[in-house]
Amino acid sequence: MKSLLFSTAIINRLKVSFIFSSELISLEPYYISKNKKGEKVVFGRINNRNEIRVFEYNKIFNLRLLDQNRFSPLIPILPIN
């Protein structure tokens, strides 16, 4: 379910919000991958910051698409095939 929501957000350039480590995060998601441990992660930019951060799927709760908030990525987004 998280993969579908993140994929939809990435393709349509929609921001998402979720709870991560007891903190509400608003994110511009860029891509989905796996870390060195083989755990699924999502890379993205937190609002008003210039850094790209990684978030582990198993620590993400209450994921929501923010339909009214579109974004233009700082880095190119590759199409998902």
Image (spheres, rainbow, N blue to C red):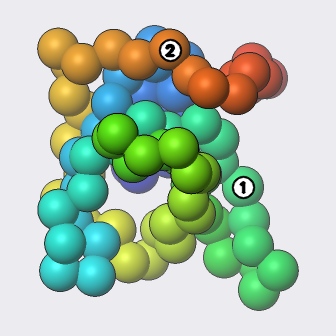
Instruction: Tell me the amino acid under the disc marked 2.
Output: Ser
| 68 relative to 7 in the view: left or right | left
Marks 1 and 2: CB-CB under 8 Å? no
- Name the secondary structure under disc 2: loop
Q: Position of residue 73 (x, y in %)?
A: 57, 22
Question: Residue farthest to the bottom?
Answer: 37
Question: Callout 2: 10 Å neighbours few (<14), some, many (20+)?
Answer: few
Q: Position of residue 59 (x, y in %)?
A: 38, 78
Above or below 67: residue 57: below
Above or below 25: residue 56: below
| 26 relative to 77 in the view: left or right | left
Instruction: Tell me the amino acid under the disc marked 1.
Output: Ser
Above or below 60: residue 7: above
- Name the secondary structure under disc 1: strand
Q: Which residue is pictured at 17% across the width and 62% down the height? A: 24
Q: Which residue is pictured at 33% across the width and 14% down the height? A: 70
Residue denoted by label 1: 33
Report how many numbered discs are placed on residues in the image.
2
Q: Position of residue 29 (x, y in %)?
A: 49, 39
Q: Position of residue 28 (x, y in %)?
A: 43, 36
Q: Earlier in the sequence, mark 1 or mark 2?
A: 1
| 40 relative to 11 in the view: left or right | right
